[in-house]
Image (cartoon, helix red, strand yellow):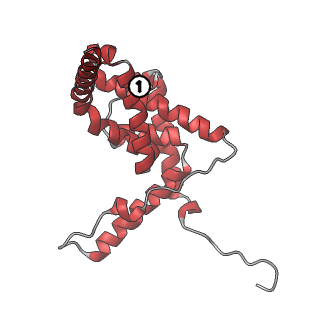
Amino acid sequence: MTKVLRLSRRRSASQRFEAALKPHFDALYAAARRLVQEDSDACDLVQEVSLKAFSCLDEFEKLEHPRAWLLRVLYHCFIDERRSRLRSPLHNDKSSADVEAVAGEVQSGIDPEVETERALRIERVMRAMDLLDRELCALLAMHDVEGMTIAELAGLTGYSESKIKSRLFRTRAKLGRLLQSEQLNGPKLKIVGGKR
């Protein structure tokens, strides 16, 4: 009898958890995808956040702003994972997202030259963003792409609003300099020795 009671409590806890997390899941996954840029890593990050939310389900259900709490936990998990990878002797930074996936399929009725130039601009921006610090790139993406406010980012990261503003300003400036530099134009051949 007690086993049946325990199972019914577990089911009700999992149902409660699903009902509490479901409205925020898409936003959580989108934010994770922006932070790590890989689907499998984003899934791992969301799973870790979900486990933390489930472990304190009673408190999670009482939160006034559960999405903000989830995003804050997500951000801290991302930072912890990033620091852990940097300390690891097996550190292997994955390549950026596939540019073709970002560019999307060519839609009918669009000029191929326009679509090619668009794809090249996207590739150039992605290459420039790969050269930025991951944390700063994530802040920029959450603000400019996800549409999060400065106040939301401050609550998420624990930084002051002025620090968020200055980091966004510096990151945009660095991104602009990278986009104007020759560094993104691809490899250049250099003649070594011989006659010129």
Q: Which of the 4 image quadrants contains residue 43?
A: top left
* Residue at 54% in and 36% down: 81
Q: Nearer the viewer, residue 98 or 167?
A: 98
Residue at the bottom extreme? 195
Q: Position of residue 86 (x, y in %)?
A: 63, 40
Residue at the left extreme? 109
- Let me know if residue 123 appears in the view: yes
Indicate the amino acid at tag 1: Lys
Image quadrant occupied by the C terminus:
bottom right
Vertical order, 54 against 62 (above or below): below
Vertical order, 57 against 186 (above or below): above
Residue at the front extreme? 1
Q: Is residue 2 left or right of residue 119?
A: left
Q: Is residue 97 left or right of residue 27?
A: right
* Residue at 33% in and 14% down: 59
Q: Mark 1 = which residue?
A: 52
* Residue at 28% in and 14% down: 2
Q: Position of residue 84 (x, y in %)?
A: 60, 36
Q: How many marks?
A: 1
Image quadrant occupied by the N terminus:
top left
Q: Is residue 9 left or right of residue 193?
A: left
Query: Badge 1: how crowded within 10 Å, few (<14), some, or many (20+)?
Result: some
Q: Position of residue 140 (x, y in %)?
A: 42, 40
Vertical order, 128 against 76 (above or below): below
* Residue at 55% in and 51% down: 131
